[in-house]
Amino acid sequence: MQENFIIDTNIFINPDSYIYFGNDPDDALKNIINIAKEKKIIFFIPPSVYEELKEFIKDDIDPNIIKRKSPSSYESSIPALFFYDFIDEMRQRINKGLRVAEKFARKNLTKENEQEIIKTLREEYRVATRENIIDSKEDFDLILLSKELNLPLVTLDNGLIKWALKLGIQVITPKDLKQLLENKI
């Protein structure tokens, strides 16, 4: 029996992920493709995520193992409650981000500390508004494709995990994927 998965770019480019499969992104990709060929496993990836992956990987991506598939965005059915929760969380994050910006605006900037203050502001604002949320169309494509094909999503992205679970999508971490690949007959 052939197994299929939806796979996120972070499996190959995030050091916390690719360490399970190789020493760098290209090594991880090569090893995952080799294991998948041997075990007859297919990974699907939305074209938007594929393009993102190509920016980080030097080697060719085997189209027989990592197949591009667009989600049927106009045909997908996502519960309204999912969007209510998403909108509510985004409003809270925007307000939290605003408070972070206000905190930094109140500090006295000098030429000596301006770069450091701005760098810290950007990082705290990013965490306040983007961490643990679906923050890109690529993320949403992964969720739509997983739901449409009823396949597990392989990711380490906490935002994807959180929102995929709300839709009943099975999520597999890189560590779990490694175990699955090693144990698969």
Image: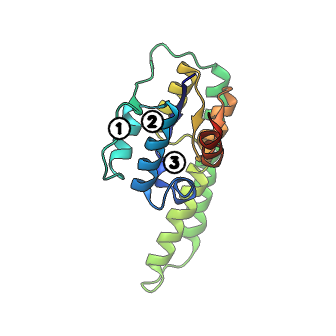
In the rendered view, would you say 8 is above or below 4?
below
Q: Label 1 neighbourhood size at 10 Å, few (<14), some (14-19), many (20+)?
A: few
Who comes first in sequence, dot 2 or dot 3? 3
Q: Position of residue 89 (x, y in %)?
A: 65, 40
Disc 2 residue type (three-letter)? Lys
**Tags 2 and 3 touching, CB below 8 Å:** no
* Alpha-carbon span between mark 1 and mark 3: 16 Å
Q: Is residue 91 visible?
A: no
Q: Position of residue 175 (x, y in %)?
A: 64, 49
Residue linked to disc 1: 62
Picture disc at residue 100: none
* Alpha-carbon span between mark 2 and mark 1: 10 Å
Disc 3 residue type (three-letter)? Ile
Viewer-proximal residue among 125 and 19: 19
Residue linked to disc 3: 11
Q: Position of residue 72 (x, y in %)?
A: 44, 18
Q: Label 2 neighbourhood size at 10 Å, few (<14), some (14-19), many (20+)?
A: some
Viewer-proximal residue among 110 and 118: 118
Q: Position of residue 95 (x, y in %)?
A: 62, 49
Residue linked to disc 2: 37
* Alpha-carbon span between mark 2 and mark 3: 18 Å
Q: Is residue 2 visible?
A: yes
